[in-house]
Structure formats: C-alpha cells, structure tokens
Image: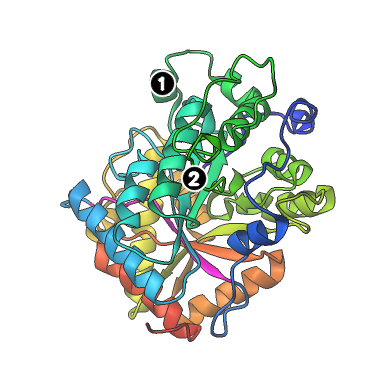
Amino acid sequence: MAADETADETTATGTAGADAPATGTAATGATAADEIRGTALGSAPVPLSVLDLVTVGSGRTATDALRTSVDLARLTESRGFHRYWVAEHHSMPGVASSSPAVILAHLAAHTERIRLGSGGVMLPNHAPLVIAEQFGTLEALAPHRVDLGLGRAPGTDGATAAALRRSATLNEGADDFPEQLAELIRFLDDDFPDGHPYRRIHAIPGPVQGSSPGGVQSPHRPPVWLLGSSGFSARLAAVLGLPFAFAHHFSAQNTVPALDLYRESFRPSAVLEEPYALIGVSVLAADDEREARRQVLATGVNMLRLRTGRPGLFPSPEEAEGYELGPMEREFIDSWTANIVHGAAEEVRAGLDELHKRTGADELMLTSHAHRGELRLRSYELVADAYGLPTA
C-alpha cells in the first residue's frame, strides 16, 4: 500500500461530493458487502489477507520473484486467506510489482477462489479510463474475485513520477484525486450523465456490453477501496461509504488516528452500511527466531537504502550484517523494524492479536519480506498453522 501523505486533509470532503457517484452501482449493498467483508477462520480474530510487493533478492531475478508470487497465491488460497493484493511501485530494483494488472492476470490464471486486487494502483499515475479498462478485463478473467484498491502517492520518487505522468506538476495529481476517483467510478459504472464530454466513451470490458443489443455482460465491477497512510483517504473513504485500507506497515504512528477518523466520519452507502477497514502489517514468522531477526535487519537495511536514494535488490542477511551503520542509520533501522511483527509462530500470533485489539481493524493484510522466496512462503504457512487455518 502506498502513502497518501502528499495532500491536505482539508480537501477530502471538497469536490468529491456533488459530481461524484459516491457509491457506484457495482452491486446491491448485500452483495458488495459480501465481496468486501471476509470471514475469520480458525482462531484468527479477523480475516487474514496478503500484500505482495514481489520482492527481488540479491542473486535472484524478477522471474524468480514472480514465480514465488504464484506459489504464495496458491499457498494462501489453500490456507483460507481472504484476498491477495499487489502494490504498484516504480524504479525500485528490489520490487518487481510495477504492473499490478499484469501480475493479477497471471495470478488469476493460477488460482480459483482467493480475491485478487491492487494494494494499490496509484491513480494519479494513470488515466482513469485506462484503469477502468484494465480492471474490467481482470473482472472478465476472474468474475467476482477482483478488488480495485487506489492510492494517491506516486509509488516512487518525484523524477520517476514525472516520467510516468509526463508532467513536472506532481502535486496536481494528488490534489485532483477526488475528481479522478469520481471519473474512474463513472467509467466503471458507465453512467456519465447526458451532456458530459465522456458520455459516449465506454470502458471495455464493461457494463455497456450488457446493455447493447444482444448483450449479456453482467454490470458487476470490482469493489473500489481507498488506500492511505494519513487522514486524507480515511476521510474521503468515509464520506463516500467505501472500504479503507491503511498502511500500518510504514505509518504505524498514524494508524489509530486514521481509523478513528474513518469510523467517526463514515456515511452509509449502497456499498457499505458500516465502516470496514483493513491494515497492512509487516510480518515475518520463522522456524528459527535468529533467522527472523536476520531477515528483519535486511528489511531495515533495504528501507534505509531506499530512503537515502540508493535503492537496490533486497539484501541477503550476510550483506545486511556487513553494512556499516552510523548512529543515525542504526536509529532509523531500529525505528523501522520496531513495527515488524516477527519471531516464532506463536510470538507472531501474539503480536497480531495485540495489534488487532489495539486498532480494531476488520482485517489484517500481512506483508512478508525476506531475501529468499521460500522464507516468505514459510512465514505465511507458520501464521496459518498458528491460527489453525484450513489445510486444503
């Protein structure tokens, strides 16, 4: 999940209102809620889900990472995880998830039940029509299994964002997010009003195919989620009655305030009668607690490199242990890794239970980072075992 920290919260309730289709016409309230709300299995306090950044470790290839993603989607589907999201990031050698729609189409071909979605697509990077077409295509490939999670941040640095958007005016996309969202939902629902310049433009695949002569296309489209790491998207999701996903894994200090704001500001809609919020959580469970600590250190070094403008492949524990750290770098890593729930399976379970109790999140979306794909797979398997999730 990418951050939304670039815009002023005070605009959240502004121009999204009168012109925006606040809830969309994806489905009746009951059907939409069924697609949004999962079921807690085993002894888990809430549904458990997956956020995948398609981590590429040093000495590994993007092909290796994508194969791990297929294996992970299959494993978590078999163990009863509710949804599997991939995040849009750019110009980061250690993250191979620059094209969420492409990855999701591949995962759809290798799974049968688990929900698939974006965590998220960064709306200011794309024309709303393009996103509507991509996710309409995904909905056609995997009917009633696709989520469209949207964020406002670029998912990269400013220069890369400018290259993506072909504009140096980066704040414009974030500031216009409510209008972009309204336009995207109208393309998804094919309901621009008469007289609108886009009235005769249709996102294909989409509802217009069902209303055309001889058409049998379902009007159903993916549920829209708003993602964030501050209060802006929390408030906007609440005003529009949409589900909300908060990036606890890199903005832990804002989690409770953002969730409180979402719940306090929530307005019932055709999508949701009550608020529904998930949080992304960094988790690494391991058979060996020492190995978990070593992988977590590697995560910290990886983030340090990224934050200091030196992104690279995800380092091995040996590389991380050999990295020379000054006092400020050590402080940064200690602060970053403090919010990673890690250790043996029961220790991780206790940490997740405490986090759920503290935040009241309706769903926990786990993201695990490790140098080797098999360690990521093992982490999810250990969490599933700790909660007694199904084994087939």
User: Residue 206's mark?
Assistant: none
Is-magenta flag for residue 258?
A: no
Give the CA distance from mark 1 to mark 2: 41 Å
Q: Residue furthest front?
A: 214
**Which residue is painted at 58% across and 31% down in the image?**
184
Say which element carries label 1: helix
**Which residue is painted at 41% across and 35% down in the image?**
308
Which sits earlier in the primary sequence, circle 1 or circle 2? 1
Is 248 situated left or right of 77 in this image? right
What amino acid is labelled 2 in the image? Gln
Q: Does residue 179 appear anywhere in the picture? A: yes
Mark 2, other Cα within 10 Å: few <14 / some 14–19 / many ≥20:
some
User: Residue 159's mark?
Assistant: 1
> What stretch of residues is rendered in magenta?
47-57
Q: Are marks 1 and 2 in contact (CB under 8 Å)?
A: no
Q: Residue 187: image x %, image y %?
A: 57, 31
Residues 354 and 304: in front is: 354
Q: Which residue is mark 2?
A: 217
Residues 167 and 343: in front is: 167
State the image quarter where residue 339 is shown.
bottom right
State the image quarter where residue 260 is shown.
bottom right
What amino acid is labelled 1 in the image? Ala
